[in-house]
Image (cartoon, helix red, strand yellow):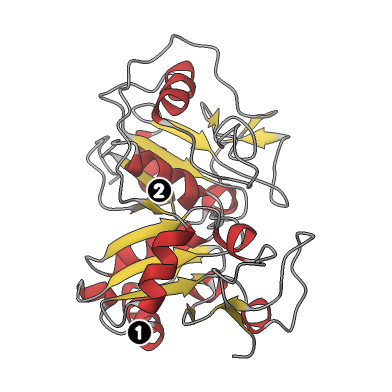
C-alpha cells in the first residue's frame, strides 16, 4: 500500500517514496552546482535554484554568500514560492549543495522545507521519471514574505570571537582532512592553506553514504567525536567550509542528529583564508 499524499514533512530529510507521492503538492527546487550539474534532466516540475548566480549576494566579492531579504524575496516569488508552500530541495550529487538552499530558505523564514535524501541519483535509481532539459519555472509569481534570521549566518568577526572565547561554542570545518591540515592546495587562487586556529574538522563527505545522509546514530557519533555536546544543544555550533555550501551539510546533519544551536559562517575559507596582513584571521596547519 502506497503512502497517501501529505505535505507535512517528516523531518529535514525526505525520501524518494515520500517525494514521489507528494511531487505534485510541493515546490521542488534543483539546487545543483558545479561540478555536479545535470542540465539535461530534472525531477518533473522542478524549478532551478541557482546558488552560483541568482541566489548569491550580487554585491559580495565572496562566492555563495546570502543575499539580502529583498533580493531573496524577489527571486523566490519569481519562482512561484508562496507563504503556504512546502519546499523540497535536491541536487544532482545526492547530498552536496541542496543543504545550502535548505539552510537559506530556513533562514528566510520558510519553515516547511526539506532536502531529498540521495537527490537526483536516488530518484533515478528508484525508477522515477525525469523530464528532459534544465529545471525552470514559467508560472505565476508567488507571495512568500522573507524575513532573514539574524543568527543563521555569522561573519569573520563573530567566528574570531568564538574561537577566542572558550568552550561554549565550537567551529567545525567541513572541508577534507587534507585541506584542513594544509596538505592539499585550495581550489581557489589566493587563499592560504590550513584552517582557522582553534577550529575542529568534520569533513562533510564522512557523513554521506552513497549519496545519502548517514544514519542518526552514525551522525551523533561523528559529532560527539568532533565536537562533544553540540547535538545535545550544550554548545553552539558554527559550521564552515570552502565557501559556505558544504558547511550546510553539517548544519543539516546536526539537525537530523539532535537539537543543536547552529550558525553557518558565510564566506567560510574563501573569506578567512585570504591574505591577512593585520593578523585578525590566524591559521594553523596540521591535523
* Residue 109 lies in quadrant: top left
- Residue in view at x 39 percent, y 61 percent: 158
- Residue in view at x 63 percent, y 47 percent: 62
* Residue 217 lies in quadrant: bottom left
The residue that disc 2 covers is: 103
Indicate left or right for 31 with 259 as reference.
right
Q: Earlier in the sequence, mark 1 or mark 2?
A: 2
The answer to whether 123 is drawn above or below residue 83 in the figure is: below
Foreground residue among 200 and 8: 200
Number of residue marks: 2
The answer to whether 215 is drawn above or below residue 19 in the figure is: below
Q: Of the residues tagged 1 and 2, which is closer to the observer?
A: 2
Q: Position of residue 261 (x, y in %)?
A: 26, 63
Q: Position of residue 262 (x, y in %)?
A: 32, 61
Q: Position of residue 224 (x, y in %)?
A: 33, 84
The residue that disc 1 covers is: 221
The answer to whether 202 is drawn above or below residue 277 in the figure is: below
Crowd rating for badge 2 (residues with CA inside 10 Å; few <14, some 14–19, many 20+): many
Indicate left or right for 172 with 188 as reference.
left
- Residue in view at x 58 percent, y 64 percent: 272
> In the picture, which quadrant includes the C terminus?
bottom right
Q: Is residue 250 visible in this depiction of the protein?
A: no
Indicate left or right for 1 with 54 as reference.
left
The answer to whether 189 is drawn above or below residue 136 in the figure is: below
Crowd rating for badge 1 (residues with CA inside 10 Å; few <14, some 14–19, many 20+): some
- Residue in view at x 62 percent, y 54 percent: 93
Q: Position of residue 189 (x, y in %)?
A: 79, 60
**Distance (Cα) linking label 1 and label 2:** 23 Å
Amino acid at each position: 500500500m502506497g503512502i497517501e499524499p501529505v505535505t507535512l514533512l517528516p523531518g529535514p530529510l525526505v525520501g524518494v517514496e515520500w517525494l514521489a507521492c507528494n511531487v505534485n503538492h510541493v515546490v521542488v527546487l534543483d539546487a545543483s552546482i558545479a561540478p555536479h550539474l545535470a542540465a539535461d534532466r530534472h525531477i518533473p516540475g522542478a524549478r532551478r535554484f541557482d546558488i552560483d548566480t541568482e541566489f548569491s549576494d550580487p554585491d559580495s566579492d565572496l562566492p555563495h554568500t546570502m543575499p539580502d531579504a529583498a533580493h531573496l524575496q524577489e527571486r523566490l516569488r519569481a519562482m512561484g514560492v508562496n507563504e503556504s508552500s512546502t519546499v523540497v530541495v535536491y541536487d544532482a550529487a545526492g547530498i552536496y549543495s541542496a543543504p545550502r538552499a535548505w539552510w537559506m530558505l530556513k533562514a528566510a523564514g520558510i519553515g516547511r522545507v526539506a532536502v531529498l535524501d540521495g537527490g537526483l541519483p536516488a530518484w533515478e535509481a528508484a525508477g522515477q521519471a525525469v523530464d528532459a532539459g534544465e529545471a525552470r519555472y514559467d508560472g505565476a509569481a508567488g507571495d512568500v514574505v522573507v524575513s532573514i534570521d539574524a543568527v543563521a549566518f555569522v561573519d569573520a568577526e563573530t567566528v574570531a570571537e568564538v574561537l577566542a572565547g572558550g568552550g561554549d561554542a565550537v567551529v567545525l570545518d567541513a572541508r577534507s582532512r587534507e585541506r584542513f591540515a594544509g596538505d592539499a592546495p585550495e581550489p581557489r587562487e589566493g587563499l592560504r592553506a590550513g584552517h582557522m586556529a582553534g577550529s575542529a574538522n568534520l569533513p562533510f563527505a564522512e557523513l554521506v553514504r552513497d549519496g545519502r545522509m548517514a544514519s542518526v546514530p552514525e551522525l551523533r557519533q561523528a559529532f560527539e567525536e568532533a565536537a562533544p555536546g553540540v547535538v545535545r544543544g550544550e554548545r553552539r555550533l558554527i559550521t564552515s567550509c570552502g565557501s559556505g555550501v558544504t558547511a550546510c551539510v553539517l548544519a543539516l546533519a546536526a539537525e537530523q542528529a539532535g537539537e543543536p544551536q547552529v550558525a553557518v559562517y558565510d564566506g567560510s575559507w574563501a573569506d578567512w583564508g585570504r591574505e591577512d596582513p593585520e593578523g585578525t584571521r590566524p591559521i594553523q596547519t596540521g591535523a
